[in-house]
Amino acid sequence: MNDKRPLSYELTKGIIKENPVFVTLLGMCPTLAVTTLAKNGIGMGLATTFVLVCSNIVISLLKRVIPDSVRLPSFIVIIAGFVTLIEFLMKGYLPELYDSLGIFLSLITVNCIILGRAEVFASKNNVLRSALDGLGMGLGFTLALFLMGAVREIIGSGCFWGIKIGDLSAKPMLIFIMPAGGFFTLGIIIAVINKIANRKPPAEISCEGCPSAALCKKSTAEKASCNTEEAAKI
Amino acid sequence: MKEMIMILIGASIINNVVLSQFMGICAFLGTSKQLKNSVGMGLAVVFVMTFATLVTYPVYILLDKIDATYLKTVAFILVIALFVQLAEMAIKRFIPPLYKALGVYLPLITTNCAVLGAAITNVDRQYTLAKSLVNSVGTGLGFTLALVLFAGVRYRLESSDIPETFKGVPATLVAAAIVSLSFMGFAGIV
């Protein structure tokens, strides 16, 4: 599939054009939860990138071996394996970051970006392309998390990377590092991107790339048919 | 008993799973468009979360015995996925009305991080089985509460006049921020 596309495209598309957070709106939970500091955002982003690249490579290698009917559980187990690996590595080498990411490190397992890329891309493309795709998407995710973290850290605690910024640190707007600030910051950033890119805002959270999309669509179609039946009865 | 009630209130309102811990955001934004869907999704999450706790608790004891608790992420997600699949088949076969109400939401819940999150939180805090169950039910109820409240907010949002660039997702997120702000008022009660 898509063998005509240049390899560099697979790498760069995830960073801006198909950025997983700002454009396809996937992986919202870690985006909102861990970005109280720019440092945490980078750490979480790189951990996810590692898992994404490794799982994409393995899934792409095994794509002919895994039977279609059990592919989702198989993907999840492969992903969970790499998540356990990164947990060990981070606990050993970066214990501080490990503590601040907390439960969200384990929850990389259910990050829909990773399962989505496995389902949409790695299970249909060769190893090199899958690895580049994983790297690009991971870096796009890291960039988004860094941006969120930087905005929230600068406004919310008046620091950047732990260094105080002049007057800002005297009276920081604490609300930005609280949960409400996460939703607010992400909303504003997406609005700004919409304005700059001058693109028509997406009507709702898109299902594209989400592994459950097929089921979801099926169920909404069923519901629609139910509704018409009910309407016909009336 | 007092402790149980504290856990229940803490899990459902004070540390609300969606609005202050950021788990299950996708489901929160995706299914809160209509009140009916949000109630169905919320109840399905309560159901899965409760039973997932029942099945992950013995798994963790087993892992602890063979000194392999580091495998908990892999083991839990497998057990939860297996349980959801079986539950879907069983409900479809034996309780068709329930399937009609909750069935469509069940497959989506496997990858809902709130379920795995609740299971991991329970073992991290070393809760007993009873406390784990109370915590899971509380978390599920908190999820339902957030979803239903937000469905109401979004209903108003649909008919309001929003600047062009904020239409759609940005406006929804800013509205979620305000709902989350209101839940901050509960902080420090327990």
Image: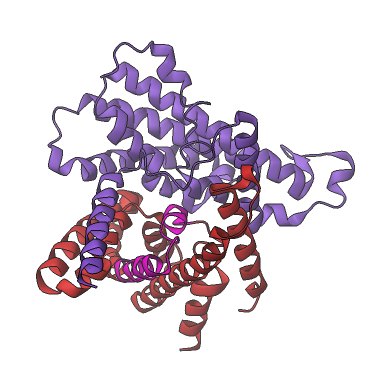
Q: Quadrant of the N terminus of chain A?
A: top left
User: Chief secondary structure of the magenta span?
Assistant: helix
Q: What span is colored magenta in the figure?
A: B23-49
Q: Is residue B128 above or below residue B171?
A: below
Q: Is residue B67 visible?
A: no
Q: In purple, which chain?
A: A
Instruction: Verify whether residue B45 appears in magenta.
Output: yes
B41 and B157: which one is in front? Answer: B157
Picture mark count: 0
Q: Is residue A185 above or below residue A51?
A: below
A160 and B144: which one is in front? Answer: B144
Judged from this view, the residue extending furthest toward the bottom is B1
Q: Give how far across and how far down residue B163 sits, in percent.
A: 66, 47
Q: Give how far across and how far down residue A101 sits, in percent.
A: 54, 48
Judged from this view, the residue extending furthest toward the left is B93
Q: In red, which chain?
A: B
Q: Residue at x 37, y 65 (%)?
A: B37
Q: Residue at x 29, y 17 (%)?
A: A2
Q: Give how far across and how far down residue A67 sits, in percent.
A: 12, 37
Q: Is residue B113 visible?
A: yes
Compared across the picture, whether B182 is left or right of A54 comes to: right
Q: Is residue A184 above or below residue B135?
A: above
Q: Give how far across and how far down residue B98 sits, in percent.
A: 22, 73
